[in-house]
Image (cartoon, rainbow, N blue to C red):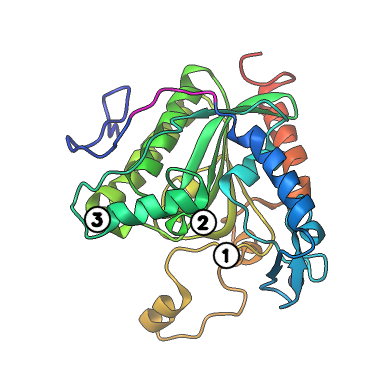
């Protein structure tokens, strides 16, 4: 069923976006390295985070490049730029729609202030960063969600950026890799937020119809409307170990069905066992695995090369 006839996914006649940028070259991922290195050097002695796995204080240096607790193996959550930094080949990333930012189409109280505050804290404009890059020499379109931006809830900007990323991939015959993470819908955008489920699903379907490979990587946590749309539509669905992957929360389900759920319910491992996930890949092996899968699908050299 065709949901959209237009080649570009347009908003619903509302002024949803403040700004529509075309593709821009963004140096932020590259400069992130320098900043991160500098930070690590100057702050490693003092900055530490409490591990949610073992409760021990772990310094940035100890957590290392992949941000994994050296004591218990717990994965710390990665920001969108950190994710792209450890996945894309060095210097290969070009960001799409870097300036796109949410307006307040429903006039939700304090939403504009919240967005501005989040942008300041995270250094990104909304909960997903998209662009193109190479992974192990294979050209692809990449998207990474950032749980530190309003719990990576999916509003109009996330939906539009992902739809545009798929459109770019269709036009250039490229595979798409999306690192999903989300708490669900962006409640401040109401129905417009829910529309992003069909929008991103339609874009993924169009890419699939064009013969493109879409790899979805589920990271902690992937829930709500993101699970119910593009995150579960990958040709190959990868998950990080122990990531929370589900739709509604445990308490909601237990309250509805009046039954106790198993302890490992909604873990990546549980979803693998029940057929929702194809493979669990460790963070340090992810880049090589993605490169291998893209190579298998497109042959040596990837998309357009
Ligand atoms: Zn730990």
Question: Which badge, 3 or 2, is on the more N-terminal residue?
Answer: 2
Majority secondary structure in the magenta region:
loop
Magenta-colored span: 20-25
What crowding class fits label 2: few (fewer than 14 Cα within 10 Å), some (14-19), or many (20 or more)?
A: many
Query: Residue at point 28% right, 46% down?
Result: 195
Q: On residue 190, which mark appears?
A: 3
Q: Is residue 265 above or below residue 170?
A: below
Closer to the chain start, of discs 1 and 2, is 2
Q: Which residue is mark 1?
A: 244
Residue 183 at x, y percent in the picture:
45, 61
- Please say whether residue 109 is one of the residues in the magenta stretch: no
* Rendered position, 294 above or below 238: above
The picture quadrant where one finds residue 204 is top left
Question: Residue 24 lies in magenta, yes or no?
Answer: yes
Name above or below for residue 305 compared with residue 202. above
Q: Nearer the viewer, mark 3 or mark 1?
A: 3
Residue 246 falls left or right of residue 42: left
Q: Position of residue 53 (x, y in %)?
A: 70, 74
Q: CA distance from mark 1 to mark 2?
A: 13 Å
> Observer-nearest residue: 34 or 219?
34
**Is the distance from the Cβ of mark 1 to the nearest ligand 1 atom less than 8 Å?**
no
User: For the residue labelled by badge 1, is the local secondary structure a helix, a strand or a loop?
Assistant: loop
Quadrant where the N terminus sits is top left
The local secondary structure at tag 3 comes to: helix
- Image coordinates of residue 222 in percent, x first then y, are 52, 58
Query: Which residue lies under the disc numbered 2?
Result: 147
């Amino acid at each position: 069923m065709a949901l959209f006839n237009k080649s570009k996914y347009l908003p619903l006649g509302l002024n949803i976006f403040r700004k529509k940028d075309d593709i821009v070259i963004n140096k932020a991922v590259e400069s992130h390295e320098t900043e991160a290195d500098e930070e690590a050097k100057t702050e490693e002695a003092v900055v530490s985070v409490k591990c949610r796995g073992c409760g021990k204080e772990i310094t940035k240096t100890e957590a290392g490049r992949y941000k994994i607790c050296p004591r218990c193996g717990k994965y710390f959550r990665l920001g969108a730029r950190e994710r792209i930094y450890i996945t894309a080949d060095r210097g290969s990333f070009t960001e799409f729609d870097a300036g796109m930012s949410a307006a307040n189409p429903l006039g939700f109280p304090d939403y504009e202030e919240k967005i501005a505050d989040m942008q300041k804290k995270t250094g990104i404009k909304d909960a997903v960063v998209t662009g193109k890059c190479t992974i192990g020499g294979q050209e692809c379109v990449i998207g990474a969600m950032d749980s530190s931006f309003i719990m990576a809830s999916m509003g109009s900007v996330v939906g539009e950026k992902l739809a545009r990323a798929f459109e770019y991939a269709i036009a250039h015959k490229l595979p798409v890799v999306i690192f999903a993470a989300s708490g669900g819908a962006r409640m401040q955008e109401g129905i417009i937020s829910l529309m992003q489920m069909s929008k991103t699903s339609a874009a993924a379907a169009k890419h699939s119809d064009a013969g493109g490979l879409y790899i979805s990587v589920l990271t902690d946590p992937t829930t709500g409307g993101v699970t119910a749309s593009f995150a579960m539509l990958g040709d190959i669905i990868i998950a990080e170990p122990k990531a929370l992957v589900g739709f509604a929360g445990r308490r909601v389900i237990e309250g509805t069905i009046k039954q106790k759920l198993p302890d490992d319910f909604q873990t990546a491992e549980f979803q693998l066992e029940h057929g929702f996930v194809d493979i669990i890949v460790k963070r340090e092996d992810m880049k090589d695995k993605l490169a291998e899968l893209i190579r298998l699908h497109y042959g040596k050299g990837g998309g357009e090369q």
